Image (cartoon, grey):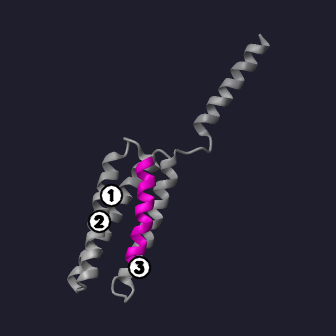
Amino acid sequence: MRPAIGVTTLLLTMSLAACGGEDKPAICNSSSDLRTSVKELKKVDIGSGTALADLKSAIKQIKSNLADVKADAESEYSDQVKAIESGYAVLKTSIQTATSSTSAASLATVGAAVSALATDVQALIADVQKTC
């Protein structure tokens, strides 16, 4: 009778550790990295003389983090990832347009694209936090 209790206790301990362990799904880390890179993007001063260079640098990091999120998200977050990819494409295009033809209007478009991308990333983060 004692060995059965020992085995049961061991199995229960192992299953509790699996549920409440410190191992989080990979999406937890990659989405956090994406959120951080978007925060850095939002810090870029659109009116500064280095804004376009700073934006180009920031979107490179976002692209890398977005690839990680996409790899980790599987199908569970596919709709959110697609929205972020779309927002990223709009931002990249708006930065290219502003680079070739810098104006108040083109910079305003970049600002709107940054805001839209940040909103999409925040929606993903809110959903992912339920998992993490």
Where's residue 14, x and y in %? 66, 30
Residue pushed farthest front?
100
Instruction: Nearest to the eye among marks 1 and 3: give it.
Output: 3
Q: Crowding near pointer 1: few (<14 within 10 Å), some, many (20+)? A: many
Task: Tell me which segment is drawn in magenta.
Answer: 55-71
Q: Residue at x 23, y 86 (%)?
A: 103
Q: Residue at x 62, y 45 (%)?
A: 22
Q: Which residue is mark 3?
A: 54
Q: As shown in the figure, which amino acid type bears the numbered disc 2?
A: Ala
Residue 107 visible in the picture: no
Disc 1 to disc 3, C-alpha distance = 20 Å
Determine whether the residue tagged by mark 3 lies in a helix, strand or loop: helix
Disc 2 to disc 3, C-alpha distance = 18 Å
CB of mark 1 within 8 Å of CB of mark 3? Answer: no
CB of mark 2 within 8 Å of CB of mark 3? Answer: no
Q: As shown in the figure, which amino acid type bears the numbered disc 3?
A: Asp
Where's residue 30, x and y in %? 49, 54
Q: As shown in the figure, which amino acid type bears the numbered disc 1?
A: Ile
Instruction: Nearest to the eye among marks 2 and 3: give it.
Output: 3
Q: Which residue is mark 2?
A: 116
Determine whether the residue tagged by mark 2 lies in a helix, strand or loop: helix
